[in-house]
Image: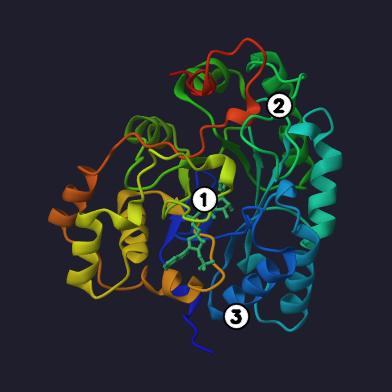
Amino acid sequence: MKRIDPSIIPKKKLYTGAEIPCVGMGTFGSDRVAPAEVSEAVEGAIRCGYRLFDCAACYGNEAQIGQVFRKVLEEKVAEREELFIMSKVWNDMHREVEKACRKSIADLACGYLDMYFIHWPFPNYHAPGCDVDARNPDSRPFSEDEFLDTYRQCEELANQGLIRHIGISNMTIPKLEAVLPKLRIMPAAAEIEMHPAFQQKELKEYLEARGIVPVGYMPIGSPRRPERDIMDEDIVDLEMPRIREIAGAHGVSPAAVALKWAHQNGQIPIPFSIHHYYENLECMTKDPLTEEEMASIAGLERGNRLVKGHVFLWEGAKDWHELWDE
Ligand SMILES: NC(=O)c1ccc[n+]([C@@H]2O[C@H](COP(=O)([O-])OP(=O)(O)OC[C@H]3O[C@@H](n4cnc5c(N)ncnc54)[C@H](OP(=O)(O)O)[C@@H]3O)[C@@H](O)[C@H]2O)c1
């Protein structure tokens, strides 16, 4: 098997001084890839040099991924301290964060989490695999008090040593403005959707200015995302002519161009892959994009949010833009 020495993978520093690899493996099978297939890819990824894994309770595969972590740790493929394992509290567990966290730690067989994200900033819950028109009557708009209560529970987990860092996800600048001054432990990272046709420059700069590392999800435009997140008007990042042109110039795939751009742009991409994970790691180690290429990708911004979040809407909400304070 081809392998890349994890020590040559560039790292970023979190505000705590801890290091995090510049690329991680996503583990959301998008309602299409079974847990066993995802965990098999995670095992291949660790053996080929990945050290950062983005997991979540709602992906429904933490127990299978945990079996892989147990195995590779026993075989000393990596030490626990070398892995950076992230998980997320799902929306239906905001009032029981410790219980959710302990379950993820037990399922992942990892002892503690390096980062624990609040997956969404509200408790609106949808059933796995639901369609775009599904609505939960209990859904409601963002509440500062509810969010702070959930966050306080994460701070408690950090104090107990169950988690090393707190992460936030799917937040917006207005929501951050409301809550950041009230937090005792700052979030170390924020997961947000980021790919060439949706770069979130303003939010990214806002996060960076506050020492919060942006983690870009759907970094290659999630070509196999769930049906509910596919709209006719969506742009396919990997088919953008300029991305294909740059790929040709470097002799790599359009996906590798999107990942190189993400890394050089300053976010940590977390591509999911069953078939291409080696390529996705390798492309971080050589042949960077030129300044001119980076500038031309900056010009590909199209405001094309792929995860609109319809399924989280509450009764009376106008449309999905409201979810993002747009
Ligand atoms: N915080 C949140 O709310 C949130 C939301 C969405 C996603 N995420 C996280 O972000 C991760 C990534 O997002 P995502 O999985 O939706 O989308 P993505 O990483 O942009 O796309 C994954 C898809 O791209 C394909 N792919 C990967 N590398 C490729 C390459 N080099 N060439 C061609 N195709 C390639 C994969 O196919 P193969 O499997 O065939 O390689 C897979 O179908 C998720 O797994 C999850 O961990 C977080």
**Residue at 37% over, 68% down:** 284
The residues bearing labels 2 and 3 have C-alpha atoms spaced at a distance of 37 Å
The residues bearing labels 2 and 1 have C-alpha atoms spaced at a distance of 34 Å
**Residue at 63% over, 44% down:** 165
Residue 70: give x, y in percent of width and height: 78, 72
Q: Give the SS element for disc 2.
A: loop
Residue 149: give x, y in percent of width and height: 74, 22
When the figure is inspected, residue 322 is found, relative to residue 85, above or below; the finding is above
Which mark sits nearer the N-terminus, 3 or 1?
1
Q: Is mark 1 within 8 Å of ligand 1?
A: no
Query: Which of label 3 and label 1 is nearer to you?
Result: 3
Q: Residue furthest top?
A: 316
Which residue is identified by label 2? 124
Which residue is identified by label 3? 47
The residues bearing labels 3 and 1 have C-alpha atoms spaced at a distance of 26 Å
> Is residue 321 toward the left or the right of residue 183 in the image?
left
Query: Which of label 2 and label 3 is nearer to you?
Result: 2
**Residue at 59% over, 48% down:** 226
Which residue is identified by label 1? 17
Q: Is residue 184 visible?
A: no
Tell me, yes or no, whether the two marked residues, 2 and 1, touch with CB atoms within 8 Å: no
Q: Give the SS element for disc 3.
A: helix
